Image (cartoon, grey):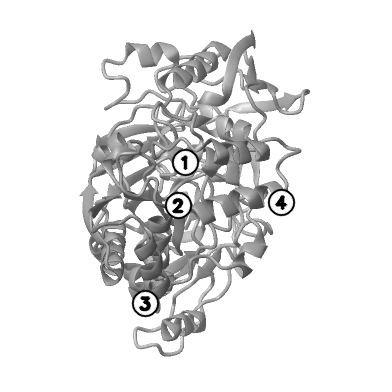
Amino acid sequence: MKKALALLLSLTMALSLTGCGSGGNSETPAATTAAAAGSEDGGAAPETEAPGADLPAGTTLSDKKIEVGYNTSIDSLNCFRSNTGRNAPYLMNLFESLAVLSPESREMEPWAAKSWSTEDGGYTYTIEIWDNISDSEGNHITADDIVWYINTAKQKALMPNFGKIDSVTKTGDYTVEVKLSTNIVGAFEALLFDTKIISQKAFEASSDEFATKAVTTSAYTCTEFTPGNSIGFTRRDDYWQTDIDAIPECVRPLVKEINYHIITEASQLGIALETGTVQVGIDVDSTTGSQFVGNNQFIVNLTDGQQGWELFFSGAESRVVAEDQALRQAICYAIDEEGLITGLCAGYGTRMWDVCPPDRIGFLDKWKDEAYYEYDPDKAKELLEASGYNGETLTLLCSSTTFVSRCAQMIQNYLAAVGIKMEINSVDSALLTAIRLDGTQYDMFINTIGGTYLPDHWTIRYDPAAYETGDATSRHDYDLAELMYETWTTDGFTDENIDKVHNYIKESAIAYGMVNPQSFTIWRNDAGLVKEVRGGLTNYVIPSACQYQ
């Protein structure tokens, strides 16, 4: 691993990314760009100019067509979605939101919204939208559509964020008033992003609720969609926002056509890059991505992980782990974090000191100096002996993607080494979405959770009032809920209160942060990249907003 890292450092040069996803904020890991321009045998790299050195004077729409490889699919174009796949870059082309997060400033930038304000400390907001928004079929968007969308999303209860809304009311043709039941930190910001700009008329006219054809206000029309395989977009000639510079840089439609190839097998994504089937691979598995370092036909951009991978334990009373803290702790001690970094990430990753990665707003740096289930098989065996475990076979639920399947296999081996039997239930994305909130389906669940603030993550996973079954694992832990609720307000979002939640989750071992892989974005040189732009809820590259030769 050290040799690989040394090679990477010898071949790279730093690039300070600009735009919606650049680093530079102390709360967010800065993006590190590796312009991997060395020779295959590790010889001296020729001098190359990093993308972004000479930028166009202004924003320019191009006729560029880009083929993108990505590893996560959606099974429907329906705008009312769960949090699964919420961060996929193609969703930025499919739907517009009221606002989008700038990882650079860590603030929301207006998109379909012109402005918003509050006068009561974050319980009530007035939102104004642009008055000229229309979708691809010419439907004009008004405040009625925003009210309809938010109320429908609240009723469908697919996203916990909408459960925090007391009411939404039209106050003018293009203004709405939103009342929240809590002024939890980050709740309104999440609402701004998760509210998609959709015409009620168009949605209700759809025979399948946009499952196969979505009518949206996006600058792009979805021209091709095959679930689990591909999704393609072509820029509209009649996009409502004629002043492209008036919207955030990370959502500007600079590319004429963009096609996403869903390639879940990491090695196949690597082959697609090598053969030119795709010109850019997003979130490439580190084992595959590391093979491109030093190849002068590619630019390899490496950024710190945005979400991390966590192990969540079932809270359903019928499962062995639910009431057995010693067993859960034994499992945490049995897993070798450094082994996961080496075996899963080829060394391109970091450990986690909490269930949430360090880029979350509210993460305390002091946690990095505190003990967090360092690998200790002897301690694991000791706790196992003190637990109520009687040799039962535990079930681990996970997705069937390459990285997660390998992770599950490594966990299985680590647990076997201390005397714990485990079977793996690896399922496709559709089934995973259907059963992931049902704690009776598993003892452990490998997942990665989005969010911007720590409370975003906590409410998605641990709020016993979030779902019909309790929290996202069917647990009803009201002691934890009380601690979480203390952090929800602006006044309560303090280091002391945050630390209490962190320590409770750590000590009770209801969840465990395992590994935070670094993210590889790999560009073919013939893509002609001039400026890479990142953004959204994560620091993923947004190919449609990048600039090319």
From the viewer's perspective, tell me whether residue 388 is left or right of residue 97. left
Label 2 is placed on what type of residue? Ala
Q: Are marks 2 and 4 in contact (CB under 8 Å)?
A: no
**The residue tagged with tag 3: helix, strand or loop?**
loop
Say which residue label 1 marks: 461
Question: Local crowd at mark 2 within 10 Å, few (<14), some, or many (≥20)?
Answer: many
Residue depicted at x 49% and y 71%: 34
Label 3 is placed on what type of residue? Asn
Percent across and percent down for residue 221 are 37, 31
Say which residue label 4 marks: 495
Residue depicted at x 29% and y 66%: 410
Taking the image as drawn, is residue 533 in sight? no
Q: Image quadrant for the N terminus?
A: bottom left
Say which residue label 2 marks: 511
Q: Earlier in the sequence, mark 3 or mark 2?
A: 3
Q: Are marks 2 and 1 in contact (CB under 8 Å)?
A: yes
From the viewer's perspective, tell me whether residue 383 is left or right of residue 460. left
Q: Nearer the viewer, mark 4 or mark 3?
A: 4
Q: Nearer the viewer, mark 3 or mark 2?
A: 2
Q: Residues under labels 1 and 4: Cα distance?
A: 21 Å
Q: Residues under labels 2 and 1: Cα distance?
A: 10 Å
**The residue tagged with tag 4: helix, strand or loop?**
helix
Label 4 is placed on what type of residue? Asp
Q: Residues under labels 3 and 2: Cα distance?
A: 39 Å
Q: Residues under labels 3 and 1: Cα distance?
A: 41 Å
- Between residues 369 and 347, which one lies in front from this camera angle? 369
Q: Is residue 479 above or below residue 209?
A: below
Percent across and percent down for residue 217 are 46, 25
Q: Earlier in the sequence, mark 4 or mark 3?
A: 3
Q: Residues under labels 2 and 4: Cα distance?
A: 21 Å
